[in-house]
Amino acid sequence: MKQLRCNGLLFCAALVFILSSCGESGSGEKNGADTNTNATTGTEPVTPPSTIVTTPENMAIIIHKVADYDKWIVAYEAHDSARLANGLHNYVIGRGMQDPNMVMVALKADDITKAKSFSKDPGLKAAMQKAGVTGQPSVSFVNATWQDTANIGSVPRSMTTFTIKDWDNWQKNFADGKQERMDNGITDRVVGHEADDNKKVVLVTAVMDTTKAFAYYKSDMLKKRREAGGLTSEPKRFLFYVAKRY
């Protein structure tokens, strides 16, 4: 009887040991799985890509009136192969805020010399007339030194051109006035100058608040900013909406 009781106690002790060992093993696997899960699902903040471009880029900008925008855009896009053959790439089409048949065409240019030559091509003139372009187009060849390429939707834009005494002085003064512009409903989109003359500035801004911006255009604050920037001509402003981005 004592022998059986002793054997029973030994069997129970062995069973407890085996179950305890299995429990520890299972617990270890579970903890390991939790650790792996945390490592797998752990995320790091993703920094969105910058929309600011500071590498200078050549552009051709044309402003002209058309008889019918819908007919013109079809003809314009049908002529794309000729532009591509001359190193010109579609970028933005704009329509005048006051007159939607006033059209702005912005193209990226591989070679300014080639783009200038193409602009004088009789075939281009004929194609523009056939598309319904009326009057004399205004053509600018621009070196864009700074751009914000973020898509901000249908906010109106202002393309402003003027002459200055010195590019470096104007650029510094312009940078100093950034917060002033933002406070008055204006954000910068493209900063540049004529390809052959950095005293002829081409500036595109977004008009986030038309009431504030239009009041700022007439303000003494902006007048002083222009004087400090060394402007030598009154700014010419073309207000437009982006009709198409390529």
Image (cartoon, grey):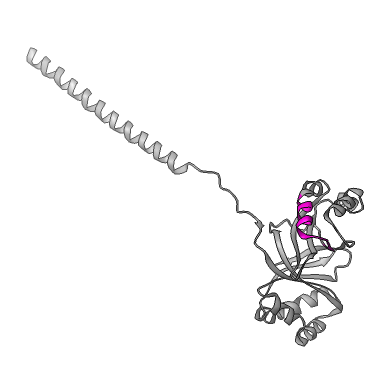
**In this image, 201 relative to 13: left or right?**
right
Of residue 77 and residue 124, the one placed in the foreground of this image is 124
| 163 in the magenta segment | yes
What residue is at 75 percent from the left and 60 percent from the top? 191
x then y, percent, for residue 126: 79, 86
What residue is at 85 percent from the left and 68 percent from the top? 100
Whether residue 242 is visible here, answered yes or no, is yes
Q: Is residue 100 above or below residue 152?
A: below
Quarter-of-image position of residue 207 = bottom right
Of residue 103 and residue 235, the one placed in the foreground of this image is 235
Q: Is residue 25 above or below residue 155?
A: above
Q: Which residues are magenta?
A: 160-175
**In this image, 41 relative to 17: left or right?**
right
x then y, percent, for residue 173: 79, 52
x then y, percent, for residue 81: 67, 81
Q: Is residue 153 above or below residue 143?
A: above
**In this image, 35 relative to 177: left or right?**
left
Tag count: 0
**Which quarter shows the N terminus?**
top left
x then y, percent, for residue 216: 88, 50
What residue is at 75 percent from the left and 63 percent from the top? 192
Of residue 19 and residue 78, the one placed in the foreground of this image is 78
Toward the top, the furthest residue is 2
Of residue 162 and residue 12, the one placed in the foreground of this image is 162
| 10 in the magenta segment | no
